[in-house]
């Protein structure tokens, strides 16, 4: 996990910011209880089309893809969830 966090800090996040890709990001979180050694990121999109356009553009960013190529061998598992806001409470 330390290598993953260092890689995100030194290359992943700078690539996202420099490429203008961080505007949909709600936040990054590191697990503290439950399953440990998890890096969770939450993104918010207004529509499925906006989400698909975002990822398509991000995957064309050479700086981000250089980072991703280094990150992939460090990952043991990846889980993706698409969620909707509940009808109550704050909406980040």
Image: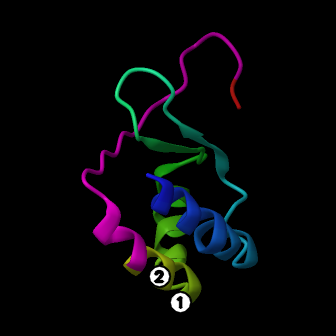
What residue would you read off at disc 1?
A: 62
Res 42 quadrant in image: top right
Q: Position of residue 71 (x, y in %)?
A: 40, 70
Residue 71 sits inside the magenta stretch:
yes
The quarter of the picture where residue 75 lies is bottom left
- Determine whether the residue tagged by mark 1 lies in a helix, strand or loop: helix
Disc 1 to disc 2, how far (Cα)?
5 Å
Q: Nearer the viewer, residue 23 or 75?
A: 75
Crowdedness near tag 2: few (<14), some (14–19) or many (≥20) residues, C-alpha within 10 Å: some
Residue 45 shown in magenta: no
Q: Position of residue 63 (x, y in %)?
A: 58, 85
Q: Which residues are magenta?
A: 70-90
Horizontal side, residue 17 vs residue 52: left or right: right
In-image side of 47 versus 26 (left or right): left
Residue under the point 54% across and 57% down:
5
Up-down relation of residue 17 to residue 67 (above or below): above
What quarter of the picture does the C terminus occupy?
top right
Extreme top residue here? Answer: 88
Identify the disc placed on residue 49.
none
Instruction: Estimate how packed mark 1 is, as few (under 14), some (14 to 19) or many (20 or more) residues with alpha carbons within 10 Å.
Output: few
Q: Position of residue 4 (x, y in %)?
A: 47, 60
Label 2 element class? helix
Q: Marks 2 and 1: in contact by CB < 8 Å? A: yes
Residue that badge 2 annotates: 65
Residue 30 image offset from top left, x and y in percent: 53, 38
Q: Residue at x 73, y 70 (%)?
A: 17
In this rendered view, identify the residue nearer to me: 64 or 59: 64
Q: Which residue is located at x 63 percent, y 10 percent?
A: 88
Image colouring: rainbow
Q: Is residue 35 left or right of residue 25?
A: left
Task: Name the residue: 58% across, 39% down.
Answer: 29
């Amino acid at each position: 996990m330390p290598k993953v966090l260092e890689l995100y800090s030194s290359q992943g996040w700078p690539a996202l910011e420099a490429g203008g890709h961080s505007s949909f990001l709600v936040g990054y979180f590191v697990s503290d209880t439950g399953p440990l050694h998890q890096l969770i990121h939450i993104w918010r999109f207004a529509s499925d089309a906006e989400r698909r356009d975002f990822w398509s553009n991000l995957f064309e960013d050479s700086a981000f893809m250089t980072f991703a190529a280094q990150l992939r061998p460090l990952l043991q598992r990846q889980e993706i969830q698409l969620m909707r806001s509940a009808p109550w409470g704050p909406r980040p």
